[in-house]
Structure formats: structure tokens, C-alpha cells
């Protein structure tokens, strides 16, 4: 018998619409980015932690709140968003977020594109850090 992974446990613990939303988001992320790494981060005594999807760095997080599931992209400000998915944390220098309240619909194709763009931005940032400096 295998034990569920921490992300599955975290999502399954949400027995309302927030769990359904995170399951859907997880499926879209996995489809857009096969092999994406999943973790639960920032767990502490007062919080069970947050699902995080990573590829060469954090692609996005899935934070369940009472009124919305917040998908935060640490490099969101630098990502193309032609469909206008970002609707929260718009004033930050780097990050952007998508708030999904109960009953919200998500443009799945645009979301998959956004996930791929976030992974590519992480890869570019990692490659830039590895380049030798000229003196």
C-alpha cells in the first residue's frame, strides 16, 4: 500500500469547492508541464502548508483561502498574459496571482500557456545565473 504524496493529502483535506479547484488546476499544470515537481511548502503548526509546483524554480503556488484559491506566480510580472488571467497582486514588482473564487471558470488553454511561460522564465533565469562573469 502506498501513502499519498503531500500535495494529494493537502488537496484531499479540502472537502469543498477549493479542493475541486485545486484538483482541476493540478491536472492543467501536469498537462502543460509533464514531470513538474510538486511539493507542500511552508507547513507549520498553524498551517498545513501550500501546494507548490516547480520547474527550475517555483512555477506557481496554490493557496486555498476562504473566498478564493490564489495561484501565485513569483515571476508573473514578467510573463505574457494576453488572456488577462492575472487578477490579483497586480501592483507587485515581480509576482502576479490569479484568484479563483467559488464557481469561477479558468481559460484552460491560456492557463497552460501561462504555466509553460513561467517554467521557461525559470529556465532562463537559471541559465543566466550559471553564465560565467566577465572581468
Image (tube, rainbow, N blue to C red):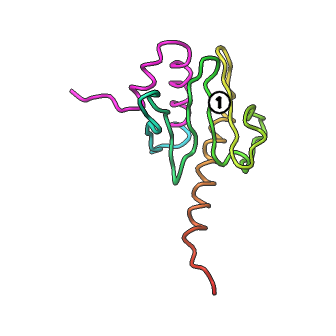
**118 horizontally vs 37: left or right:** right
In-front residue for pair 2/95 = 95
Residue at (54%, 47%) from the top-left corner? 58
Direction bottom: furthest residue: 135
In-front residue for pair 4/113 = 4
**23 horizontally vs 105: left or right:** left
Residue at (74%, 49%) from the top-left corner? 93
Residue 110: x percent and y percent? 69, 36
**123 horizontally vs 82: left or right:** left
Task: Name the quadrant of the C terminus.
Answer: bottom right
Q: Residues within 10 Å of mark 1 (few under 14, many from 20)?
A: some
Q: How many marks?
A: 1
**Rendered view: 89 above or below 65:** below
Residue 82: x percent and y percent? 79, 40
Task: Kindly indicate the quadrant of the structure image that contains residue 48.
Answer: top left
The residue labelled by disc 1 is 108
Residue at (43%, 39%) from the top-left corner? 39
In the image, which residues are magenta? 1-30
Considering the whole magenta stretch, tell me its main secondary structure. helix
Direction front: furthest residue: 45
Residue 104: x percent and y percent? 68, 18
Check residue 78 for magenta coloring. Answer: no
Amino acid at each position: 500500500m502506498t501513502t499519498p504524496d503531500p500535495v494529494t493529502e493537502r488537496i484531499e483535506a479540502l472537502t469543498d469547492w477549493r479542493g475541486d479547484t485545486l484538483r482541476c488546476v493540478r491536472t492543467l499544470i501536469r498537462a502543460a508541464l509533464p514531470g513538474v515537481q510538486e511539493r507542500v511548502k511552508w507547513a507549520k503548526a498553524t498551517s498545513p502548508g501550500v501546494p507548490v509546483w516547480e520547474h527550475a524554480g517555483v512555477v506557481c503556488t496554490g493557496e486555498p483561502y476562504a473566498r478564493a484559491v490564489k495561484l501565485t506566480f513569483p515571476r508573473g510580472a514578467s510573463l505574457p498574459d494576453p488572456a488577462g488571467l492575472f487578477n490579483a497582486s497586480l501592483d507587485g514588482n515581480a509576482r502576479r496571482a490569479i484568484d479563483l473564487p467559488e464557481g469561477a471558470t479558468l481559460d484552460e488553454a491560456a492557463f497552460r500557456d501561462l504555466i509553460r511561460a513561467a517554467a521557461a522564465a525559470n529556465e532562463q533565469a537559471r541559465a543566466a545565473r550559471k553564465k560565467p562573469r566577465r572581468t
